[in-house]
């Protein structure tokens, strides 16, 4: 089955509460610091056709010229999705920010689950920008999608503070979509990790999504937050899953939802847990 993106499901509302559940005899809890930067997914094909690799990118600041982003991704005909949570860094009041994309070829930018730039087409170098007013400390999900058809390839995202004209480093204002995952430890079951989540209630456009429209969930996991190489499918009537007998190590998890048309959402926030 070819998984296409469920473009209209809100990334931030999607399964935002995925967390390791607490077994009955929980003895301690730990918190994991957020990971700076964007969660980047690199695909073969111009429409997220085949996921090759995922990793954390501190900025969206890439000029691949006529080359490819990494081994396994072709020079032409690939696509990338970056997901992150942006926090307005100013201290008080409301301030205007400008989000500018500069890409070859196409781009979409979602801010707070709204598509504010939609230039999903073959094109050479193009700048697009969108201004938005944010309160101090306001946090918004950002998703930038990019496609390369052929020839030269680059993708940049710049965020500018319009009060002083300065560009804001996204490595300091964007985190991968999980702020404070809470992991638990349970000595008697230390090879077990349980995940639970909530179904998304709305799509990107704000309309509701019915549970009956959800076909299944995909749990992506691995030993590196930068590379969730394993996948486990869960039926749509489930809202939790327990991995048994996972090897020792530090495990990272994210989840996506696939609708009945085979369209797949963006990732949920990452959660992680160590097994010792
Ligand atoms: Ca191109």
Image (tube, helix red, strand yellow):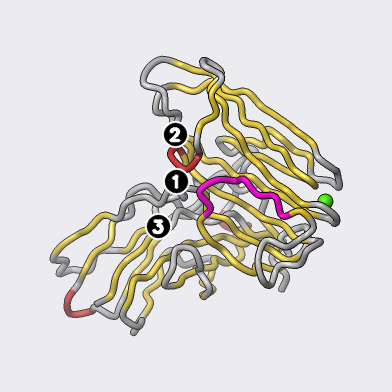
Residue at image location 51% in from the left, 68% down from the top: 227
Q: Mark 1 or mark 2: name the one nearer the start of the chain.
A: 2
Q: Is residue 13 above or below residue 242?
A: above
Q: Does the magenta stretch include residue 227?
A: no
- Give the secondary structure at mark 1: strand
Q: Position of residue 45 (x, y in %)?
A: 77, 63
Residue at image location 29% in from the left, 80% down from the top: 191
Residue position for label 2: 87
- Give the secondary structure at mark 2: strand
Q: Please tell me whether mark 3 or mark 1 is closer to you in this view.
A: 1
Q: Mark 2 or mark 3: name the one nearer the start of the chain.
A: 3
Residue position for label 1: 175
Residue at image location 45% in from the left, 37% down from the top: 173
Segment tinted magenta in the rendering: 57-64
Q: In this view, does 31 lie to the left or right of 90?
A: left
Mark 2 and mark 3: Cα distance apart in space: 21 Å
The tag on residue 18 is: 3
Q: In this view, does 269 lie above or below 275?
A: above
Is 165 in front, or is 208? Answer: 165
Q: Where is residue 248 in the image (x, y as percent from the top left)?
A: 31, 80
């Amino acid at each position: 089955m070819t998984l296409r993106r469920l473009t209209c499901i809100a990334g931030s509302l999607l399964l935002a509460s995925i967390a390791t559940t607490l077994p009955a005899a929980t003895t301690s809890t730990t918190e994991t610091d957020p990971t700076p930067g964007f969660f980047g997914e690199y695909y073969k094909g111009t429409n997220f056709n085949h996921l090759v690799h995922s990793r954390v990118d501190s900025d969206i600041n890439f000029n691949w010229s006529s080359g490819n982003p990494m081994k396994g991704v072709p020079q032409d005909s690939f696509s990338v999705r970056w997901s992150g949570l942006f926090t307005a860094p100013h201290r008080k009041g409301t301030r205007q920010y400008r989000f500018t994309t500069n890409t070859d070829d196409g781009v979409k930018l979602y801010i707070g689950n709204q598509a504010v730039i939609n230039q999903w087409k073959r094109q050479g170098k193009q700048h697009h920008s969108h201004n938005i007013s944010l309160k101090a400390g306001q946090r918004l999900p950002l998703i930038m999608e990019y496609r390369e058809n052929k020839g030269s390839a680059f993708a940049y995202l710049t965020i500018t503070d319009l009060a002083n004209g300065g560009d804001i480093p996204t490595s300091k204002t964007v985190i991968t979509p999980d702020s404070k995952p809470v992991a638990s430890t349970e000595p008697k079951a230390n090879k077990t990790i349980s995940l639970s989540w909530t179904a998304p209630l709305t799509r990107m456009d704000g309309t509701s999504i019915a549970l009956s429209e959800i076909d299944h969930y995909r749990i992506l996991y691995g030993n590196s937050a930068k590379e969730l190489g394993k996948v486990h499918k869960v039926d749509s009537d489930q809202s939790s899953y327990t991995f048994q007998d996972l090897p020792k190590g530090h495990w990272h998890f994210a989840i996506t939802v696939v609708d009945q048309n085979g369209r797949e959402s963006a990732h949920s926030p990452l959660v992680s847990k160590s097994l010792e």
